Amino acid sequence: MNKYTVPVIIAILISVLTATAQVGNRFFPEKDLITTGIYYYPEHWNESQWERDIKKIAGMGYEFVHLAEFAWFKMEPQEGKFEFDWLDKVVGLCAKYNLKVLMCTPSAATPVWMRTNYPETFVMDGHYIRSEHGTRGLGSIVNPVYRRFVEKIVTEMARHYGHNENVIGWQLDNEPDAKPDYSPSSQEAFRQWLKKKYQTIEALNAAWGTAFWSQWYSDFDQIIIPNTSLVGWWGNNPHALLDFKRYSADAQAEFLDFEAAILRSHILKEQFVTTNYTAVSTGADPRRTNKLDFATYTAYPNGGSDNIGEQGFRLGNGKVILFAAEYYKTTGGVSGVMEIQPGPVNWGSYNPLLLPGTVRMWLYHTFAAGGKLASSYRFRQINYSAEQYHAGVIQPDGITPSEGGEEYMQFTKEIKELRKKYKPGVTMPAKLAARSTAILWNLENYWTLDRQKQTWQWDTWNYPVKFLEIAKSFGAPADVIPETADLSKYRVVIIPAYEMADSALVKKWSEYAANGGHLIITCRTATKDRMGHFWEAEWAAPISGLIGAHVKATDMLSNNGKGDILMRSAHYRWNNWADLLAPDKSTEALAVFDNQFYKGKTAVVKHKVGKGTVTYIGVDTDDAKLEQDVLRDIYTGAGATTENYPPGIYVYWRDGFYVAVNYSSDNYTMNMPGTASIIIGEKILQPGGVLVWNE
Ligand code: GAL
């Protein structure tokens, strides 16, 4: 070894590590920006129409066709008899019209012979009733017989299409959801999972707190899956339920890895393997897989809800893509939208027409947030069956583009123009890098918080999203990261209600602040250990040193309760959650409660730690004004400028382009520097509008 060996080894290690963290990138040439595709189900249509349809797909500017997702019945019509001739024809047509293929494994929808001859392959609900044939997503993913059938079909498909250079990649299954399964196979798999985790029944008894209400076990074989249908939701054991969530998410991830491994052993290395998680996925955890090249999401922003202003019910909920686009990047370093709503759906609480421009805006939103692919469910609106009311990009006549279809065409055309303007090697503008933000989030905390909300006003899913929205209102680039992520590249790290933590994690947070980072920790953080037990110590004990304060008690109000907080001379309202804080001497009290019997007690503190700062926000407000004002000061203190975008205006920078979208019902005039030159859209963004520029 000479003096250069160590640095060289370190450099190699770093490049290997970065390469693994960013594996998804290699499938998408940067100059292509984003590639677009469409779901086509040839099995739904007369063969005589296939060529017409594929030609039309190409004509609309799409670049890939998504095939075979639920077509198991057609590929294996009888057990062990595989038929790919029909699919070969469609794949051939795609090649003829210069379209790539994204092939799907069909495990989400099984053929009828499976349920008839092998009922054990189906999940059971909490009343131990076996699901029936007739829909999708009901396979018991831990059942060995189901696995065997999946293995066969995936192997056959991989052998058949794994060397077709026109196939760019594979989607596994459909919207994996870690469904609770109470079948005998799942009961056994759960017990095995527990044995592996706890080794001894004593350890399990301690972790689950089974001394309570005589739940005590003397053997793993006595354990059944905690069953809220039969035991009740309120009275069930939260630690056992947490383990059931973990087990279900592990089983789901392992099932995806199982499919991925089969594919990988057959397919070209140029073909990617991914899956399409739902944007709001509360069961399946993409971070538990380790064989996907990257993860994608499905986005249905409009399911009949009010949203921002009068037109909000047409424009959809901006938070859907906002969160999913960042969260899913944490698997493989890149992401994209696999399904985007092409118009009204059939399952919303009501299904309005979208405001013209909305589909295009959603597409730009996914693009702006770094998306590498954007495809839509589905090409033709189907004339029959469960989703007949669901829009396609082509109307039921099979030939006329819908409004969403027209907008998609505009998008594919515009992206081709943007590609011409792409310049390689651009780096993020300094003013944006100075605002770089990370939000720490994981599903495990979602599970425990949602299980024991303490107030029905606690909005578990939207709580972290609120901080993402605040960061976006400042124009900050913001990532949603796991606890293993490197924090050092972020100017600000936000830890919203991170309920379960341990001292090693808190040490990592402290080091980040000590090295000059700006940490924002909010209520409920580190109040439980990893099993969901409270500490036998003061409330939130692991972080009291870090935040320089002690959480003395917590209050909640009714939804029309009037909690008042004073910060400098401004008053703020709260009613969801309030930690009453006792700051240490060296800690600054930023805000105090200004009514209720504890008037004068502290609500928000700031503590200097090494070269950085730690701010603790003990309050959850509905309008987020307090949180926003606290955060703005932190960014300013950290030397970053901030924008002041109103709700529904999201602005991103990617590959040299600034992109803005407008989910609000009002026009918004974008403030741009004199050097700005508009590429797409106008300075005044209308509702549903898009603006692309560079500076
Ligand atoms: C998605 C699903 C699609 C389709 C769509 C309808 O969740 O993945 O297969 O059913 O919903 O909106």
Image (cartoon, grey):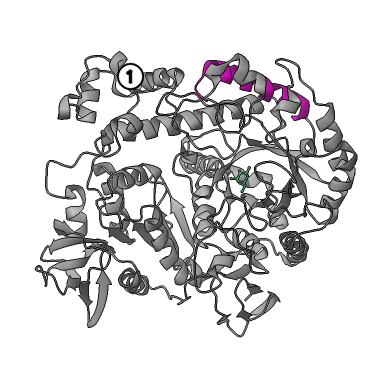
Residue type beneath disc 1:
Lys
Q: Is residue 153 magenta?
A: yes
**Secondary structure type for disc 1:** helix
Locate the C terminus and report the quarter of the image it occupies. Answer: bottom right
Q: Quadrant of residue 595?
A: bottom left
Residue 616 x/y as whole percent: 25, 62
571 or 520, nearer to the observer = 571
Residue 623 x/y as whole percent: 35, 70
Q: Can you see residue 428? A: no
Magenta extent: 141-162
Residue 205 x/y as whole percent: 21, 24
Residue 29 x/y as whole percent: 70, 51
Q: Residue at x 50, y 74 (%)?
A: 309
Label 1 crowding class (10 Å Cα cut-off): few <14, some 14-19, many 20+? some
Magenta residues, dominant SS class: helix
Up the image or down, 395 lies above or below 150; here it is below
Up the image or down, 567 lies above or below 36; here it is below
Up the image or down, 2 lies above or below 280; here it is above
Q: Which residue is mark 1?
A: 195
12 or 472, nearer to the observer = 472
Q: Is residue 252 left or right of residue 47?
A: left
